[in-house]
């Protein structure tokens, strides 16, 4: 019995049935599996981290000095930032205090003040001043008061301004 590479060859038997597979397919499948396994192993070995390069003692010392300088600089920067943060907190507290004082002053100034009416003085005893005050208290403008009292408008305004001031 001559068999050619494409012929079917019984390979194994299942439950009294013979399964036939081309011989070439079996050989190629085995070779492919071996190749895949080799590639996977090669890839896994290359993925490993390479060993760190060996440093000369001088390079190692320079690297250590550089790291020490970096740590010292980091410490100084952190201390500087802490000092500035503390200063900012103090300034904010001072600003809040000043703002509260300004708000208190503004509230005190916005309250209505009782109108001060000066008591009787030497000027209040003058009959002209009394009549000017009476007419102004009734709501007349200085021009009308001057006409009614036959006085100059400037004199009436002066009397009223002296009363206010």
Image (spheres, rainbow, N blue to C red):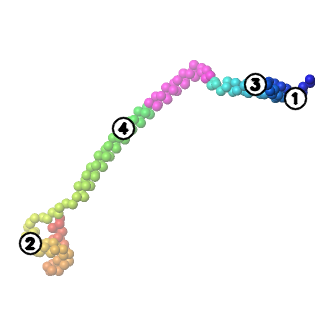
Please rate how many residues cluster around mark 3, counting C-alpha atoms within 10 Å: few if below 14, some from 14 to 19, many from 20: few
Judging by the rendered image, the residue that carries numbered circle 3 is 34
Give the CA distance from mark 3 to mark 2. 131 Å
Q: Position of residue 59 (x, y in %)?
A: 58, 22
Q: From the image, state whether disc 4 or disc 2 is nearer to you.
A: 4
Give the CA distance from mark 4 to mark 2. 68 Å
Classify mark 3: helix, strand or loop.
helix
Q: Classify residue 32 as left or right of residue 149.
A: right
Give the quarter of the figure containing the C terminus: bottom left
Magenta span contains residue 74: yes
Judging by the rendered image, the residue that carries numbered circle 1 is 7
Give the CA distance from mark 4 to mark 3. 69 Å
Q: Position of residue 85 (x, y in %)?
A: 38, 38
Give the CA distance from mark 1 to mark 4. 90 Å
Magenta span contains residue 143: no
Earlier-in-chain disc, 3 versus 1? 1
Classify mark 2: helix, strand or loop.
loop
Q: Residue 68's mark?
A: none
For the record, the magenta segment spans 51-75
Classify mark 1: helix, strand or loop.
loop
Q: Is residue 115 above or below residue 104?
A: below
Judging by the rendered image, the residue that carries numbered circle 4 is 86
Q: From the image, state whether disc 3 or disc 1 is nearer to you.
A: 1
Earlier-in-chain disc, 2 versus 1? 1
Quarter of image, res 79: top left
Earlier-in-chain disc, 4 versus 3? 3
């Amino acid at each position: 019995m001559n068999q050619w590479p494409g012929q079917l060859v019984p390979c194994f038997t299942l439950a009294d049935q013979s399964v036939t597979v081309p011989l070439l397919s079996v050989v190629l499948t085995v070779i492919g599996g071996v190749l895949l396994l080799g590639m996977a192993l090669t890839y896994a070995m290359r993925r490993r981290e390479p060993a760190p390069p060996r440093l000369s003692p001088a390079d190692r010392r320079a690297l250590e000095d550089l790291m020490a300088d970096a740590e010292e600089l980091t410490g100084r920067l952190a201390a500087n930032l802490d000092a500035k943060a503390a200063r900012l907190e103090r300034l904010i507290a001072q600003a809040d205090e000043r703002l509260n004082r300004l708000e208190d002053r503004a509230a005190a100034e916005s309250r209505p003040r009782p109108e001060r009416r000066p008591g009787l003085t030497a000027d209040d005893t003058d009959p002209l001043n009394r009549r000017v005050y009476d007419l102004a208290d009734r709501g007349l403008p200085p021009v009308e008061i001057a006409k009614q009292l036959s006085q100059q408008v400037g004199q009436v305004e002066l009397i009223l301004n002296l009363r206010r001031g």
